[in-house]
Amino acid sequence: MISGLNRKVFTQLSYGLYIVTSHLDGRLNGQIVNTVLQVTSEPPRVAVIINKNNLTHDLISGSKVFGASVLDTSTPMTFIGLFGFKSGRDVDKLSQVNFFTGETGAPLVIENSLSVLEARVIDEVDVGTHTLFVGDVITGDILKNGEPLTYAYYHTHLKGKAPKTAPTYNPEKD
Ligand SMILES: Cc1cc2nc3c(=O)[nH]c(=O)nc-3n(C[C@H](O)[C@H](O)[C@H](O)COP(=O)(O)O)c2cc1C
């Protein structure tokens, strides 16, 4: 029998790492997420989970579009630090990287990215600290061959951590 919650269970869930971007009134921003998930094939639909305090949340809520880039295993920690530990409220992240503008107007980051897609939000679920955005994929393509960066690789090889704003943050480790 088991009773109570051993939060180590959550460390065994597998994810990739992505940059999710959006735009609103000319403002561009993006952040690291581990929570891009394909939810259906027809229509091609993805979901992403974003903390309500993040600037990226405000942009996606306002514009109802988002972009996502699949990060390469060779992504340096400085890049993850910029997008995953700094807010666009304090620093202009997109001015520091290469991107192109998608059909939805979302900036699609190409630096350290194996592939990109963009989506229009069709539904939003309030899950408490975060919002789960579901979007129809409008465009998407492979940029180069490589190995997608996994959350396991990030933890084991890059010795990376999850900040408080990440859904996977473990409050018992602080
Ligand atoms: C490995 C990693 C995974 C993360 N996953 C998520 C996530 O799935 N959802 C989320 O809202 N924040 C996640 N974050 C935290 C955001 O990237 C971070 O709060 C960012 O600074 C928000 O930037 P913004 O305010 O410019 O939008 C993650 C960070 C890291 C380093």
Image (spheres, helix red, strand yellow):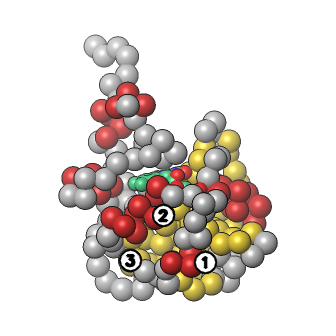
Pick whichever, 91 or 132, lies toward us.
91
* Horizontal and vertical percent position of residue 78: 36, 67
Query: In which quadrant will I find the N terminus?
Result: top left
Residue 133 x/y as whole percent: 64, 55
Q: Nearer the viewer, residue 48 or 154?
A: 154
Q: Secondary structure at mark 3?
A: loop
What is the CA distance from the residue labelled 2 to the residue labelled 3?
12 Å
Residue 119, image x, y percentages: 63, 70
Look at the numbered disc 3 and say if its residue's Cβ is closer than 8 Å to ligand 1: no
Estimate the spatial distance between the alpha carbons at disc 2 and disc 1, rounded to whole Å: 14 Å
Badge number at residue 112: 3
Residue at position x 29%, y 42% in the image: 12
Q: Are marks 2 and 1 in contact (CB under 8 Å)?
A: no
Count of numbered circles on the image? 3
Residue 11 locus on image (x, y percent): 31, 40
Amino acid at dot 3:
Asn
Query: Label 1 belongs to which residue?
Result: 107
Q: Quadrant of the C terminus?
A: top left
